[in-house]
């Protein structure tokens, strides 16, 4: 079965197509530059600049599917022309097979896909769904009521609020040994995938330049491209090793990390909410347990879900999965509130196994339909060409929402804002 994703071609770095770097098996993009002599074409894929090598084994085809005699030197292939790239899976690797002029992978709106794949995705500027924050206790979506915390509530229930205040009181500057110190640091770390690193790295830029931020808060972006929740499940998995490297480079000891921001998503979700949502919740719970084992002084995990994905051109994480991911966040928080022993967060009840889970900012809005609370919209220009990753304006929107949250939330502001 083929999957699809959209690329825009631009200047970049050499890319080897492996399962870790390219999820899709069929791509549509726009040529920015061709080096026929060297046999390469440059692409923007999954939020990063890349370069594809068009070897002699790669078929270079015209719109009609027939081989172009001059291959990359063919006059039909030029900058700004659309092309379709097909990749085959060989074992655990992906091998580039064809480069064909024209758009062949994306639906023209008919909703019909290829004979061996699911229906192609049709881009929409809205999907007719209220944000979870606007749904009431009496409104339901696939059996789930509204509100970030359920029962139409967007603020933590009283018992959770008490727990949050207790955990927040432990967030203080710490030295490299994890002991409270006036000249210590409060590590604020991101854990997630490509969307998150694109957004959080922008947040770090604007937050570090904000005079209101405490100089003792050390923001470190540990989110990584292609590393969704499932890739962080194993305690010794590659993203954790990279997170260690980034912390060391930033001069932050794991014992100083006390707050994490986790954006929940998995690659290529499938099935109904009860299937993909519960898997996402399960994976995220493992991530929180891993974080507690790695960061002994961690107190709170602020969780988030996806931005709008109605413009997506691939099955990497389109709607309604982007919207439905919020329920995985809620379920995880509710399970912890109900006393799930595997998510025990208070050392007073025995060694904590996870940080306290709370909602951070909620980013989803119904495309161009303004969100009632703040007027948030997601226009097509807020997304990159694949409709899944944020563009520059999309990154800025999320970064500003993160900064506003940490500066204004009654609890987060106590440690984030300069005294």
Image: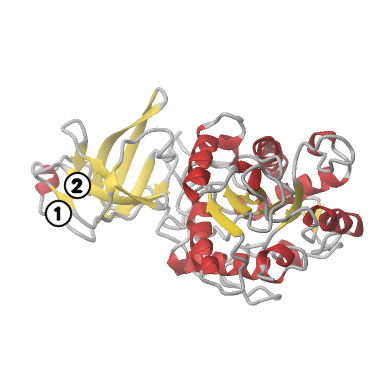
Q: Residue 33 sits in which quadrant? A: bottom left
What separation in Å lies between label 1 and label 2 (alpha carbons)? 8 Å
Asked if the residues shown at circle 1 and circle 2 are in contact, with their CB atoms under 8 angstroms apart, the answer is: yes
Residue closest to the far top? 91
Identity of the residue drawn at 84% across and 40% down? 347
Give the camera-side residue of 1 and 258: 258
Q: Position of residue 64 (x, y in %)?
A: 22, 46
- Say which of 375 and 174 sits in front: 174
Residue occupying image coordinates x 53% and y 45%: 247
Secondary structure beneath dot 2 equals: loop
Q: Quadrant of the C terminus?
A: bottom right
User: Which residue in the structure is indicated by mark 2?
Assistant: 62
Q: Is residue 103 visible?
A: no
Q: Residue at x 54, y 52 (%)?
A: 220
Is residue 208 in view from this perspective? yes
Q: Residues within 10 Å of mark 2 (few under 14, many from 20)?
A: some
Instruction: Name the N-terminal-most of marks 1 and 2.
Output: 2
């Amino acid at each position: 079965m083929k999957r699809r994703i959209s690329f825009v071609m631009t200047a970049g770095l050499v890319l080897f197509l492996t399962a870790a770097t390219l999820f899709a098996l069929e791509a549509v993009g726009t040529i920015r530059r061709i080096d026929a002599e060297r046999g390469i074409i440059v692409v923007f894929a999954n939020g990063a600049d890349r370069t594809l090598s068009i070897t002699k084994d790669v078929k270079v085809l015209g719109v009609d599917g027939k081989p172009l005699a001059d291959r990359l030197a063919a006059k039909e292939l030029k900058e700004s022309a659309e092309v379709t790239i097909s990749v085959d899976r060989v074992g655990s690797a992906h091998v580039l097979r064809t480069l064909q002029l024209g758009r062949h992978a994306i639906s023209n709106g008919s909703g019909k896909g290829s004979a061996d794949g699911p229906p192609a995705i049709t881009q929409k500027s809205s999907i007719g769904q209220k944000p979870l924050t606007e749904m009431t206790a009496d409104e339901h979506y696939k059996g789930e009521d509204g509100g970030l915390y359920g029962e139409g509530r967007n603020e933590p229930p009283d018992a959770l609020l008490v727990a949050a205040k207790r955990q927040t009181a432990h967030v203080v500057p710490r030295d490299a040994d994890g002991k409270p110190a006036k000249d210590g640091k409060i590590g604020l770390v991101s854990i997630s995938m490509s969307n998150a690193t694109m957004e959080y790295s922008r947040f770090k830029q604007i937050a570090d330049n904000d005079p209101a931020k405490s100089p003792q808060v050390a923001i470190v972006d540990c989110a990584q491209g292609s590393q969704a929740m499932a890739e962080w499940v194993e305690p010794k998995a590659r993203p954790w090793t990279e997170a260690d490297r980034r912390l060391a480079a930033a001069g932050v000891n794991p014992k100083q990390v006390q707050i994490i921001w986790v954006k929940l998503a998995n690659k290529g979700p499938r099935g109904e909410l009860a299937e993909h949502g519960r898997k996402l919740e399960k994976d995220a719970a493992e991530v929180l347990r891993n974080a507690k084992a790695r960061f002994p002084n961690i107190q709170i995990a602020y969780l988030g879900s996806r931005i709008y994905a109605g413009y997506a051109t691939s099955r990497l994480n389109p709607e309604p999965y982007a919207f439905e991911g919020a329920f995985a966040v809620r379920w995880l928080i509710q399970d912890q509130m109900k006393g799930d022993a595997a998510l025990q967060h208070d050392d007073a009840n025995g060694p904590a196994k996870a940080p306290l889970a709370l909602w951070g900012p909620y980013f989803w809005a119904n495309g161009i339909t303004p969100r009632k609370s703040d007027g948030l919209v997601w226009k097509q220009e807020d997304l990159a060409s694949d409709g899944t990753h944020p563009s520059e304006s999309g990154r800025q929107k999320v970064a500003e929402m993160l900064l506003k949250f940490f500066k204004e939330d009654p609890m987060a502001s106590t440690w984030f804002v300069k005294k």
